[in-house]
Image (tube, coloured by chain):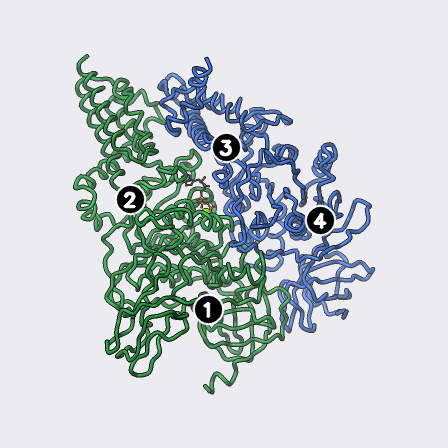
Amino acid sequence: MKEYRTVAQIAGPLVFVEKTEPVGYSELVNIVTADGTVKRGQVLDTSDEIVVVQVFETTAGIGRDSGIRFTGETIKMPVGKDMLGRILSGGGKPIDGGPDIVPEKRLEITGAAINPYARAPPEDFIQTGISTIDGTNTLVRGQKLPIFSGSGLPHNDVALQIARQAKVPGSTEEFAVVFAAMGITREEANYFMADFEKTGALERSVVFLNLADDPAVERTITPRLALTTAEYLAFDLGYHVLVILTDMTNYCEALRQIGAAREEVPGRRGYPGYMYTDLASIYERAGIIKGVKGSVTQIPILTMPGDDITHPIPDLTGYITEGQIVVNRELHRKGIYPPINVLPSLSRLMNLGIGEGHTREDHKKVSDQLYAAYAEGNDLRGLVAIVGKDALSERDRMFLEFADLFEDRFVRQGLYEDRSIEETLELGWDLLATLPEEQLVRIDRELIHKYHPKYRKKAQG
Amino acid sequence: MDKAKEKRAHGALKRISGPVVTAVGLDAHMYDVVKVGNEELMGEVIKIQGEDIIIQVYEDTAGIRPGEPVENTGLSLAVELGPGLLTSIYDGIQRPLEVLVDRMGNFIERGVSAPGLSHEKKWEFVPAMKVGDDVKAGDILGTVQETNIVHKVMVPPRSKGGKIKEISGGSFTVDETICVLEDGTEIVMLQRWPVRVPRPVKAKLNPDIPLITGQRILDGLFPIAKGGTAAIPGPFGSGKTVTQQQLAKWSDAEIVVYIGCGERGNEMTEVLTEFPELEDPKTGKPLMERTVLIANTSNMPVAAREASVYTGITIAEYFRDMGYDVSLMADSTSRWAEAMREISSRLEEMPGEEGYPAYLAARLSEFYERAGRVIALNGMGGSVSVIGAVSPPGGDFSEPVTQNTLRIVKVFWALDAKLSQRRHFPAINWLNSYSLYLDSLNEWYDKEVSPEWNPLRAWAMGVLQKEAELQEIVQLVGSDALPDEEQITIEVARMIREIFLQQNAYDAVDTFCPMSKQYDMMNAIKHYADLARTAQTGGATPQQVIGITSKNELPQIKFIKDYEPALEKIMKDMEAEFDAMRAV
Ligand SMILES: Nc1ncnc2c1ncn2[C@@H]1O[C@H](COP(=O)(O)OP(=O)(O)OP(=O)(O)O)[C@@H](O)[C@H]1O
Ligand SMILES: [Mg+2]
């Protein structure tokens, strides 16, 4: 392979190389520094005059004396059956002291888009054992459902609890887990690893670690390596795969850094204008394919800068994913775990995975009613702060109390408490029963007569 | 052979930067379709700068090198129009996704071209004209039963027309001649039309018939006319897609073109699985039979996303020209605008507001301008209604795409995260939304629904407006401090919101509400309001009036298909309760 020593300019993570033979767009590049270290990069722009290479590692050590080798192919990832149980770097190299992966295939890490015509609708209910998810923001197999959190909030606990408890009722198959860390601390990573080890999940996991002190640019490929692995496990080997990506905020910061280095016209708040498309090329890699056994379910985690849900990172994510689970600081302060605020949370695929034949016929309407009542009670809290409880009507007072009860009983649960969907729905009815029946306008009479505790007691008694 | 074409139809690549590539050594015109690289990826000329021909490529360009060949086809980006469009699902440049699965498996690889229509399939053509008839552009030569929809085979819009020399019925592919004119012109069923050029019409009419959607807040308060334009902006998760899908399902258009532009793959799958099972409330036939889908999802190439809206609207215009009422949904126009922005920034054009190209406003208005109620060239009346979703960053409507869109469209359905968070659906804000068609549609409502409908709507809007004012006071002093009369207003407004405005898209009955039921429901609420007012002036307390129990049954009406007896009973019970109140 030809080696060029024609570096013209180095700016941030970008190396400009001139006088090359034709180089392919997106091609993988090896850069050999004076001390013999090989760094990897990718072609961002190519012409017969200049080739722009984005380096995935620090550019320290790269200079005009470095050798540039264009590999003639785009970035591929070796995948194989023996990947389960392995720990790899954010760049895909084993870091657990084990042998190299025996490749059965080498796959393009950008991953082609699933043809929408080939997709099957995701509709298998995943029971996470967490009421605020199962009851009101149901996750289904093949969905991409991120956790929107803030720094210092227990999103890792929530993600781990999901990974521990997730099951499809009636199926004994366990999820394979692909875990990709991007820029998180060693301590956080250890927390995940310890839990995987404790529960035995590690054996059916593939872990990619790009930690806080690893090169930021590498973060832009870590999730793609993880998803390439997940797709292989799912669509080639037939596993149901749960992918946890954390923290997408660090990924986006890396994108911003590269954009700035390329002197691009920045979009909102300095993030690249193409961030939507870029994030979509990650998040859309979830789903089910008709006639193919496995599935890829994604739970990306991101911390909202300043707890601001309109910040471009959560905003663009929410526009792509199929809902979001929002972890809330106020609930956390109140000592409620999991501090999931159901109001801004949403699962768009919920309707496909619930109801008769999936969970229970009353599920949708119970959920709607819980939302409506909690939202109303929650609004009244603001009012009470101004006018005091006495100025409220009797009806308002009931809703106010409902909001407290909801947080205390429905939202709050133990770190290891694994509630069945029936338990969750019963709990919902118990809470709704504290309101007068005629306030339950979201539920039709028939279901009320069938499931409302008042009538059920009568029927039993 | 055309000498100019012969001269320099072949050039070579000079630069590749994502979806934008530069070629040299070839002659080209703007919007010519070119084949790029050894794999002959499809592209389109979008800028000419001296010797540099700048091309947007509709497929992934990874691995393509400078020096690879580029060939100019000399044609502009066009769609194939003819029998076979209905029930299809296409990508942004009209490649049938079903064919792509056959050709390259479950993932979309590149370098495969596939025509929009099947060129093998035979269709039964029934002539409507005979030898000797004079025809001109747009005239209907005959028909093909495409699905339950009759496909009208037309003389192409740019044809000179003439006297028919030969025409005969029978089984034909889209390429076979069905008619020969005296000057020797052979006419086939297939038409190719450049997507960036509107198809010609004879005249544009004023829209004065509503597109009935079965969605109460839309038909009832903010209707769109057939041939009208509407925008539906809202933050993520507020209900743009569900609303658009509701319109695609239940609106009384005859043809639906649904464009998934830079959105989710699963949403298209949902349409694909659901629509064949659902029945058109008007014809009883599967909804899929009247539908054309365009799916260029967020992870498919951005240049093809840019093209997808043009592909969609050209197909819509084609069916309009047959005399059909077509409705087109574009979800989301913001992703289209972003594709323009991305391409423009690769071209290193001078960015306008928030990085969007300076021509954003022009492109948006050109697109919406293609909507309208028209007299087609053949004299038939048809329409294209366009409903565009807008996805403003951070849900902030002051951004360029929303603002430029609102300057053009006549109907604004403002989605509101506050409503969706409390699961008030459709989460359309009744105070901010508007329809500029109200005046021109009044007459239709008078005639087709009831002369009382327009006053009833005005009354409901009045109550909702009043409620908003009262809520401000309530926020300061609590609801108990309001005068009796106003407490009742608050209750009536709540009924309008919860009974009339809220509509569950996922309930088998409530998902579609016929206009007559909308009228009955609003009328019932008004009836309660009138009874309440009389009782209150007669000395009843708000608690008494609000405590009427029979009115609590009203929300149930939504979920009952044959609701009339139940509604009648509620009305009687309400009257009885109020009578009893007076008696005490
Ligand atoms: N009319 C409705 N009836 C019942 N539920 C609805 C309705 N409209 C929206 N929803 C609920 O809101 C969710 C989000 O709606 P939708 O997917 O249409 O949002 P969106 O505005 O298109 O978001 P995005 O911009 O991210 O695509 C739906 O999954 C559904 O649960
Ligand atoms: Mg949407």
Chain A visual colour: blue
Amino acid type for the residue under numbered disc 1? Glu
Q: Earlier in the sequence, mark 4 or mark 3?
A: 4
Q: Nearer the viewer, residue B212 or B335?
A: B212
Circle 3 crowding by C-alpha within 10 Å: few under 14, some 14–19, many from 20: many
Circle 1 crowding by C-alpha within 10 Å: few under 14, some 14–19, many from 20: few
Residue B399 image position (x, y, % from top left): 43, 50
Circle 2 crowding by C-alpha within 10 Å: few under 14, some 14–19, many from 20: many
Q: Which residue is mark 2?
A: B219
Q: Nearer the viewer, residue B103 or B241?
A: B103
SS of the residue under disc 2 = helix
Q: Is residue A364 visible?
A: yes
Q: CA distance from mark 2 to mark 1?
A: 43 Å
Chain painted green: B
SS of the residue under disc 4 = loop
Residue B145 image position (x, y, % from top left): 34, 61
Examine the rendered structure and indicate whether residue B451 appears above or below residue B477: below
Q: Which residue is mark 4?
A: A90
Residue B548 image position (x, y, % from top left): 27, 20
Q: CA distance from mark 1 to mark 4?
A: 50 Å
Quadrant location, the N terminus of chain A? bottom right
Instruction: Give the number of the mark in front: 4 or 2.
Output: 2
Q: Is residue B340 visible?
A: no
Examine the rendered structure and indicate whether residue A356 appears above or below residue B19: above
Please indicate whether residue B271 sits to the left or right of residue A56 in the image.
left
- Do callouts 1 and 4 point to residues on the same chain? no
Q: In the picture, residue A187 is in which quadrant?
A: top right
Quick check: marks 3 and 1 in contact, CB under 8 Å? no
Q: Which residue is mark 1?
A: B120
Instruction: Give the number of the mark in front: 3 or 1.
Output: 1
- Chain bearing tag 4 is A
